[in-house]
Image (cartoon, rainbow, N blue to C red):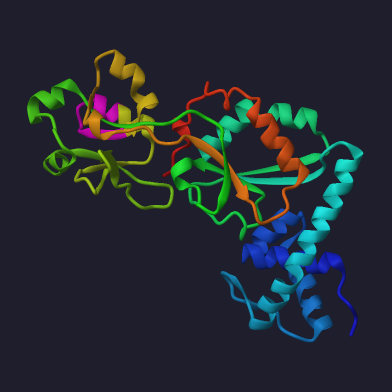
Amino acid sequence: MTKPTLADLEAFSVVASERSFRRAADLMGISRSALSHRMRKLEEQLGVRLLHRTTRSVSLTDTGSKLLARITPTLSELDATLDSLAEERGEPSGSLRINASKGAARLLLAHVVPSYLARYPDVELDLVSEGRLVDIVEQGFDAGVRLGEAVPQDMIAVSISKEIRFLAVAAPAYLRRFGEPRVPDDLHRHRCIRQRLPSGKRYHWEFARHGQEIAIDVPGALTLDDSDLMVEAAAAGLGIAFIPEETARDRLEAGQLVAILKAWSPPYPGLMLYYSGRRHVPSALRAFIELLRGSDMQAGLVSPYEASDR
């Protein structure tokens, strides 16, 4: 049997992680057909089938799962060894993959990424923005950035922004016409501007007071997927919106909107960069965290309101 190359095994690991030839090929910078050919060659060399292929997806065979479980620690150890060599040279190198919501990615681009790229030119930064939460380990990311409440409990998290608070707001004219809700359950009798999350689900408004937590699927004829649009709709008297306080601050101060149920709206942890403590932390990620800690995001000067995808 001809032994497969390290490159072939690494390619198999990427395909197994992404469950997609297209995404894996994009990550590796090669064509989908070239990657598919490489996987067929690997299967021929080993004399076993590793992947189930359909027109829409890729999955592992039992043999493929066993191979992946065996080679993953070895590939991780190799990455750690090569990374330690980079440290001996004094500068991080290689790639750094970070998954973040679109708003979080926007903040990183504005406050951290330019300095990072200028300081560490040998690092290739792959910043992937998407609304849905993913398993960063399973998907091959070094780190993720999300609001604190969305960070998995088994991750190491670094706070990088101030707290965020969500408020229910409405126009004064709306409240004069329909009255002001006194407790969250009163919202069931109101016109609410609902929010569609990036995952496609509608957001259930979350309230808390004295240890009591309530999540309400509010009624409403209007659903939007953007906080700024929700603020505009609420200011126009179309109903009650539930949005980050920073988003509505100008209109609140101008009296165009009124905050309601404030006693039920405590602040929540802001943005967190998180990563697995069970894997080797590459020097490129350690350098990124160090730069974050010295940035204005860490100093609390940046609002994370745009980064919410709950």
Q: Looking at the image, which is closer to me, 148 or 229?
A: 148
Q: Is residue 74 above or below residue 167?
A: below
User: Residue 8 colored magenta?
Assistant: no
Tell me where residue 231 sits by quadrant: top left
Q: Looking at the image, which is closer to me, 69 or 189?
A: 69
> Could you say where residue 302 lies in the image, as x and y percent from the top left?
52, 24
Residue drawn 79% across and 63% down?
A: 75
Q: Is residue 35 visible?
A: no
| Residue range corresponding to the magenta coloring | 232-242
User: Residue 235 colored magenta?
Assistant: yes
Q: Is residue 265 above or below residue 310?
A: above
Q: In the shown orientation, is residue 244 left or right of residue 142?
A: left
Q: Quadrant of the N terminus?
A: bottom right
Residue drawn 69% across and 78% down?
A: 66
> Could you say where residue 238 lies in the image, as x and y percent from the top left?
20, 32
Q: How many marks?
A: 0
Residue drawn 83% across and 59% down?
A: 78
Q: Is residue 9 above or below residue 97?
A: below
Outermost residue on the top side: it is 254
Tell me where residue 51 sits by quadrant: bottom right
Q: Looking at the image, which is closer to me, 94 or 44?
A: 94
